Image (cartoon, rainbow, N blue to C red):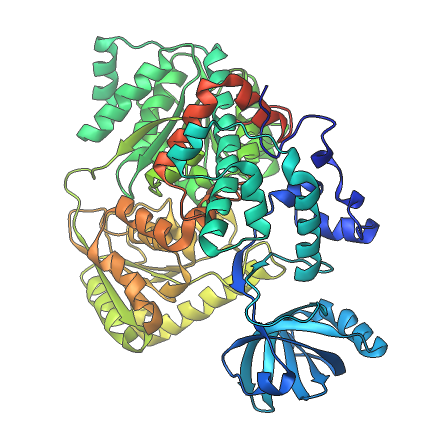
Amino acid sequence: MSRLPGRVEAGDPARSPLSELPGVGPARTRALARLGLGSVRDLLFFVPRGVEERGERVPIRAAGASIGRRVSVVGRLRGVRLLRRGGRRSVLSATLEDGSGSLGVLYFNQPWLLDRLRSAERSGEELEFQGRVVRTRRGAALASPRLGPAAPPRTGGGGLVCIYSLTEGVGQALLARLARTAVERFARTLADPLAPEDLAALDLPPLARAVRDLHAPPDLPSFERARARIGFERLLVLQARLERSRVEAARGRARAFPLDGGARKRWRAALPFSPTAAQGKAIEELADDLARTRPMRRLLQGDVGSGKTMVALFALAAVSSAGGQAAFLAPTEILAEQHALCLAPWLARFDLEPVLLTGSLASAARRRALESLARGRRRIAIGTHALFAEEVRFQRLDLVVIDEQQRFGVAQKQALLEKGKDVHALLMTATPIPRTLALCLYGDLETSVLDEKPLGRGRVETIVLPRARRGEALRALANRLERGERGFVVYPRIGETGEPGGEDAQAAAVETAGRALARGGFERYGVELLHGRLSSPERVARLERFRSGASRLLVGTSMIEVGIDVPEATLLIVEGAERFGLAQLHQLRGRVGRGAGDAQCFLLGGSEDAERLAILERTEDGFAIAEEDLRRRGMGDLAGARQAGENLEGLALPWVDAERVLRARALVRADPALAARCLAGNGAGSVAVV
C-alpha cells in the first residue's frame, strides 16, 4: 500500500520530533516551532525562500576591493555594537579581521544576532561570513551576510546555498545543518504515492530526490523542480480537503424549497428589478439548488455593481416566505446597516421584516432581536460578526448568505453554518477570483458569475495623477458638486485597526483632511466624515445626509469600499493610491458610476507606481484586474488574504497553474485512500465546507 509522501505511517522515523536531531534542545525546539517546524517531516518539507550562489572564498584584503561581488571570508570579530534607531529599526555593526586586513560587517534590524557576535568576539572564534560587499562611508563592508563556523578551506564558487525564512534564535547555518542531517537520515524512508506516468506528465521528480534537491540543490533547475514537487504535495492535501467537503455536503439532508416554473416566474416578477441575463441565470441556479435536499454550496461572483445583492434577495425571500430562516452576514457594520436599510422595503413586498444584529446594537434592542429569532417571529437576520455569538439562536436556520466572503476565515463561516442543520449556503464576492485560485480554494463549490452590469449604468473614466497635480482632481470635484452631484475622497488606512491607537489615528487623519477640504472651499457643499470611531447611529445619520444630498462630499477611509450605493455619486478621489491593491482600488471605483451619468475616478500616487495603476485606466473588467493582481502578487499573497487561518504555503510558486490543480483534484477523487491519507497526515476532524 502506498503512503502519502512526507506524511508517513505511524512509527515511521520521519514522524520523530526535531529534538531527536543533534543540537536541538528545549530552547531550539521552541524557536523552531515558531517557524511551524515540530517534526522531521516538517523540516524535510520546509521550502527555502530561494537559493544564492556561494561566494568565492577570498582573503579580507581582496574582499575589500570587490565592491558589488558576493564573497566568502573567514576571520575574527572585534568592535561589536548595536545602534537602535527608534521603533524596531537597528544597525548591528562589527569589524572582521584576518592576517590580510579588516572589513566591516553590517546587519539591519536583526538585533537577536548581538549575543552570537559578542560571544564570538569574546572567545576569538573564527567565523565564516558570506554576502555581498558594499561601499559605506567608512569603507567596504558585508551587508547582512550569512554566518557560520569556519568551514575547511576551498577555492572557487561553492555551488548553491539555500536561503530559509528565519526567526529569533534560528539562523541560516543552523537550519542548513538540521536540514542536511534530516535528509541524510530520513529522505530514503519517504514513500512516493505518484506513479511514474504521473510524475512524467507533471514533469516532477520522485519525492526522495525532490527532498534532497530542495535542501542541497546541484543547480537552479533542480531546485525549482524540487520546490514544485513539494508544492504539489500541498495541492494534494488542499484538494483532499475540498473533496471531503463536497462529499460531506452531498450526504446532508437540507430542507428543500421547491419552486416550479410558474412559481419562479411569479417570484421573479415580484422582485424590485428586471434581472440582467446573468442575474436571471444565477436566480435559476439558486432555485434549482434550493429545491434539492442536498445543501446548496454556491459561490456567486460578480464584478462591482453587477447586482449580487438583488440575486441574494431572491434566495432570502424564497426561503423565508416558505417558513425557513436566513442569516445574511456582512464583514462591516456599515455594510450590514446599508443592506438592512436597502433590503427592508423590498422584503416588505413579501411580508418579511429583517432584524439587524451588530456589535454596537443597544442592549434592549439586542435582547428583542435575539428573542425574535429564537422564537421564529423574525425570519431574516442581517448582521456582522455579532451573528457568531453563542447567544444568537434560530428556531430553524435554513439559509446562510455571506457577503464579501473572502473577508471571513473558514472557521468563522463554519461557526455560522453550525447554527442550523444541513444549511444551504450562498457565498458572494465582488472581488473576481482568477480561475486557478478559484480551483485551489473553492473547488467544492458550484459557481455562478455575474459578468454584466445592469442596464442604464454610466461609464467610469479612471485618471492616474501624480500628487503634484492634486489640484486638477479637486477642481473636477468642485465642478461636479456645483452641479448637484456627489463625490468621495478616500484616504489610506494608517496601520491596522487592531493596533493600539489604530482607529484613533485613522479618525484623526480623516478629520484633519476634512477640515482642510472645508477650508479649501468645499464647506458650502456639505462635508461628511466617515471613520471607525463613529457610533452606529452617527454613521447612519451622516450617510443618510450624504445619500439625500444635504451633504455632497463624503471623506473617509477605505471602509467605504463596499455597502454605499448612491447613484448621484459621480466622482471619486483616492489619495495615496499606491498603498492600495488593484482589486481594492477597483472596489473603491465601484462607488461611482451607479447612475445613468458618466463618472470619474482620480488615483493620486507616486510616479514609481504609475505603471501599475495605469492598468485601471485601461480596463473596468474586474476579472482582468484580478488576473493582473494574481500575476503581480502571487498565489500565496492572494490566497492568504482570502482564506485567513488556512495553510496555503506553496501556492506562491510560479508553476501552480490550472492544469496541475486539476491533476491534483483528479488524483484524490480517483483514489479515496490517497485522499484519506492526505487528511490523516494533516490533522483529523471536520473541515469546513466553505
User: As displayed, is residue 154 above or below residue 541?
Assistant: below
Does residue 444 appear in the picture of this structure? no
Q: Residue at x 31, y 15 (%)?
A: 288
Residue 254 percent across, percent down from the top left: 46, 12
Q: Residue at x 30, y 68 (%)?
A: 610
Residue 399 appears left or right of 448: right
Does residue 181 appear in the picture of this structure? yes
Front residue of 212/173: it is 212
Residue 217 appears left or right of 638: right
Residue 306 appears left or right of 241: left
Front residue of 518/358: it is 358
Q: Tell me the quarter of the image containing the N terminus.
A: top right
Front residue of 65/591: it is 65
Residue 280 percent across, percent down from the top left: 22, 25
Task: Residue 262: name its quadrant.
Answer: top left
User: As displayed, is residue 498 above or below residue 363?
Assistant: below
